Amino acid sequence: MDDKTYDVIVIGAGPVGENVADRVVQGGLSAAVVERELVGGECSYWACMPTKALLRSGAALRAARQVPGAREAVTGDLDVAAVLKRRDAFASNWRDDGQASWLEQVGVPLYRGHGRVSSTRVVEVTGKDGSTATLTARHAVVVATGSGALVPDLEGLRQAKPWTSREAVVTGEVPGRLAIIGGGVVASEMATAFAGLGAAVTVLARDGVLPLAEPFAGEHVVKSLRESGVSVRLGAEAASVKRADDGTVSITLTNGEQVEADELLVAIGRTPNTQDIGLDAVGLTPGAWLTVDDTMRVVGEDGALFDDGWLYAAGDVNRRVLLTHQGKYQARAVGDVIVARAKNGTVEQGRWGRHVATSDERAVPQVVFTEPEVASVGLTAAAAEAAGLRIRVVDYDLAATAGSSLQAEAYRGQARMVVDEDRKVIVGFTLVGPDVAELLHAATIAVVGEVPLDRLWHAVPAFPTVSEVWLRLLETYGR
């Protein structure tokens, strides 16, 4: 038995947990991190990094084929083995030596094992070898355990052993036929990746493709997927699944049709990793999302602060925004606010204060790395209207910018800004087109900074770039 006391204990060493611990230590407190899998978490090994590595090779090849001169130099298709090898490298070959070493360098002890809250400010850690450690926090315990893929209770689905995002990302072989249940970000990106790698892909998108984005975004992605040979079945809903002895997966749809594939990927959502972390020991519900206040302290069902405020939850597990960069943003606020409270400092809890995650509300940036890319920040037009804002929507064809003609021979894309007419500021921005991810941060700054449209006229875009769309949108809006 190993008994240790620290100022802060973090359960989960993904990007969120790492950032919490780092901020705590920078603030002069001590912190320890507990991790049952790999330091670096989902993003490093099964999500952000390896998935984008899978997608990048195909995107580069498509880009080359769209530019005369480069097109003629392309003499073959993707080297699948090389793509998978590059993916492995971006996942550090599923070894966490480098990230574990970083924790050591910044002075954060790592406890490898399964962490469970056993009582107020106490975490029990059980190692794979059966060893145990009791960790006590002077000030706070932070739950940063993330989320896992949701597998629904569909007849025969679990027995068919479907892929989740993890299995899709780590596969050593590209299936001849891949069926995907879902139409969100993971489903769309994996359909793009595996179609590029040579699989015959079928997408069963009951609720449409990218249903939470502006409608034109999904329309562009569907068109591109179909052009690449993907069968996109909008409105299709699976009723049951069966895997035959030869490995073939049969998906029966609610209309009686059947879809056959060699592998099935289920990508319909996420579930919190809180099933076995000891929540029941302190009166909370295992397996539930953790609700938090603006400084990420856990609150009860009645909205009141849980206990005396010692328990925090950051990242996916609090369900505010299930994106790595937003989780890291929350983590910075959490680490800083814990330090402030521990030292009886001032807590900046107002809107846009240092210790709150205001951006989670209406300024979340996101990129979907499909073909074409979808980059957005803030509210869609529908969400803005639902929030009661009086808005004006301004659209512009990205292909009409001078920079787009230099990027590709047949450039296709669209931009939309959603303007709050009462304040004359942008509250939402969406871009669809090749490489638009790199244009997004300018929009994020405009939304977060609530930059007046009159001032944006003085932000002159360089010529000839696709960023010229800012000028064109303002001209379309009128002054």
Image: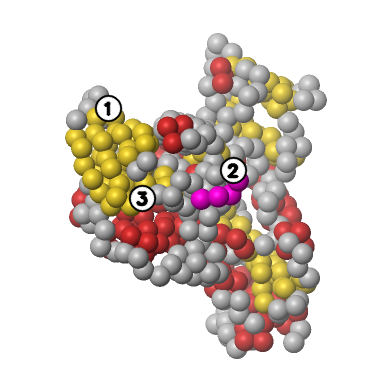
Instruction: Report the magenta stretch's main SS.
Output: loop
Q: Amino acid at mark 1?
A: Lys
Inspect the image, locate mark 3, and give the three-letter code of the amino acid beneath it: Ala
Q: Nearer the viewer, residue 230 or 303?
A: 303
Say the numbered circle drawn on residue 128: 1
In this rendering, is residue 159 above or below 311? above
- Label 3 environment density (alpha carbons within 10 Å; few <14, some 14–19, many ≥20): many
For mark 1, does the 10 Å Cα neighbourhood hold few (<14), some (14 to 19), or many (20 or more) residues? few
CA gap, disc 1 to disc 3? 25 Å
Which amino acid is tagged 2? Glu
Can the viewer see residue 234?
yes
Can you identify the residue that label 2 sits on?
301
| Numbered disc 2: secondary structure | loop
Residue name at image x 28 percent, y 43 percent: 136
Q: 83 or 390, which lies in front? A: 390
Left or right: 386, with 327 as reference point: right
Marks 1 and 2, Cα distance to the nearest angstrom? 34 Å
Q: Which residue is mark 3?
A: 140
The residue shown at (31%, 64%) is: 343
Crowd tier of the residue under label 2, counting other residues whose Cα lies within 10 Å: few below 14, some 14–19, many 20 or above = few
Label 1 or label 3, whichever comes before in sequence order: 1
